[in-house]
Image (spheres, rainbow, N blue to C red):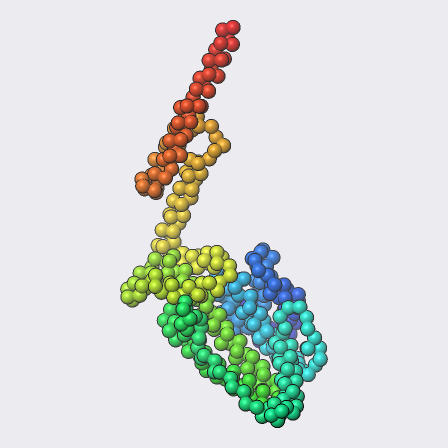
Amino acid sequence: MANKLFSQMSEEERQSWTKDYCNWQSRVLPELMKARTMTTSFRNDFELGLSLLSAFPYCRSFVAESLRFKNYISRIKPLARYADKVTADAEKMLNTKVDLSDPALLVRHVGRPTKQEAAARALKEEQERKAEEDKETLFGKKADIPIETPPAPATVSGSLTGGALLHLDQLKWLLPLKLQEAVDAVRDLRNRASEEATIAKQMALDGKHPKDIEPHAQAAAKLVEEYEGIYERVDDELAAVYVRLKEDTTFIKKMEEKQVNPSELRTMLRPYWDKIEDKEAFKAAVIDFIKANDPAQAAVREQEEIKKKQVADIVKYLTRKDKPNTPKRISTMKARYEELKSLMGEQEAAVYQPVLQAAIDDCNNNVIPAIEAKKSSKDDEQEA
C-alpha cells in the first residue's frame, strides 16, 4: 500500500491510510512544527509523514527530494503545506464536506491551523471587515474611502547584498529542467491566485453564502501553495548550487567553461545558503549526492578523507601530554613526523617540529636521567 496512490486504494486500504494519516496530522505534525533540532524521533516522524503523503502524485517529487537531501528541519513548512493540500483532496475523495460557517473551525488551538480553519477565519475576518466598512464615518461609509495597495513583485525569489532584487528568470539556468518549467508557471499561478482571491472577496462583500465562496477561496489557497512550493524548491536548489560551487570539482569546471566565475556566483547565492537551518546536514546531503553521481570524484574524496584522518591521528599522537617522552616514544614520534611531512608537505608539517623538539629535550633532560638514576639505585640495593 506504501507505493499505491490514494485513488488506486481499495476501500479498506483507504480507511487504514486515513486512520494513520489523521493520527499523524493531529498528533505528530504539530510537534514537528515546534522542532528546532534533528533527532531520531523527529526523523522517524517526518519520514512517516512523507510515506503517507506519497499516496498523492503531486507530493512524490517533494518526498523524493526530502529523502535524498535529508534536510528535514528546513522542510517543515513545505511539509505542512502539502499536508493541508492532501487533507483537502482526501476529504473531497472521501465525499467529506466542510462547512466554513462551522463555529468549531474558529476555535484557536496550539499549532498551525488546518486549511479549512484558515479559510473559515479568513471568511470571518472578511465578514467583520464588511460590517465595519458599512459603519458611517465623518467622510461617509468606510467602504467608499479609496485604499491604495502597492503591486507585489511577480517573480522575486530573494535579495542580494545591497538590496538588489534577484528574479527567478535570472536564475533559471542554474535549475534542473523540470524546475525551470515550474518557474515559468509562477507568474500564471500568481495571477490566477489573485483572480480567485478577488472573486472570493467580492462574493463575501456581496453577502454570498459561504458554501458558494469556499471553492474560490480554496482555489486561491491551492494556487498560493503551488507557487510558494516552487519558491521553496528554488531556494533549496540554489543552496545546493552554492555548496557544489565549492565542493563539486566537475561542476566548477562546467561553470568555468561557461565563462562564469564560481567565486562571484557563489557570493550571489549566499542568501539562499543563509536560509538553510541545519547547514551541516544539508551540506552532507549535497556531498552524498555528488559522490553518488560522480564515481571518479567520489574516489578522490574517499582518498582525501583517508588522508585527513591519517593526519589527524598523527597530530593527536604528537601533541598528547599523557605519555612520558621515553626513548621509544621519541623514536615513534620521529617516524610519525616524517610520515606527516609526506602527507602534508614539509612546510605545513613544520608547525609540529617544535612539539617534537620539546619532547626530545624532555627525554634527554628529564626522562633518561630519571631512568638512569632509578637503575643506579637498584644496582646499589643489589650490591648492599
Is residue 213 among what the camera can see? Answer: yes
116, 111: nearer the viewer:
111
Picture coordinates of residue 96, whole percent (x, y): 66, 80
Which residue is at 38% across, 69% downward?
174
Which residue is at 59% across, 59% downward?
42
238, 373: nearer the viewer:
373
Picture coordinates of residue 141, whole percent (x, y): 62, 92
Is residue 208 among what the camera can see? Answer: no
Q: Is residue 334 above or below residue 229?
A: above
355, 226: nearer the viewer:
355
Q: Quadrant of the N terminus?
A: bottom right
Q: Is residue 145 left or right of residue 170?
A: right
* Furthest-top residue in this view: 384
Q: Is residue 342 above or below residue 185?
A: above
Which residue is at 39% across, 75% downward?
169
* Total numbered labels: 0
* Furthest-right residue in this view: 103
Picture coordinates of residue 267, whole percent (x, y): 38, 63
Q: Quadrant of residue 129?
A: bottom right
Q: Quadrant of residue 286?
A: bottom left
Picture coordinates of residue 5, whole percent (x, y): 56, 72
Q: Is residue 16 left or right of residue 351?
A: right
Which residue is at 34% across, 35% downward?
338
Q: Is residue 199 above or below residue 90?
A: below
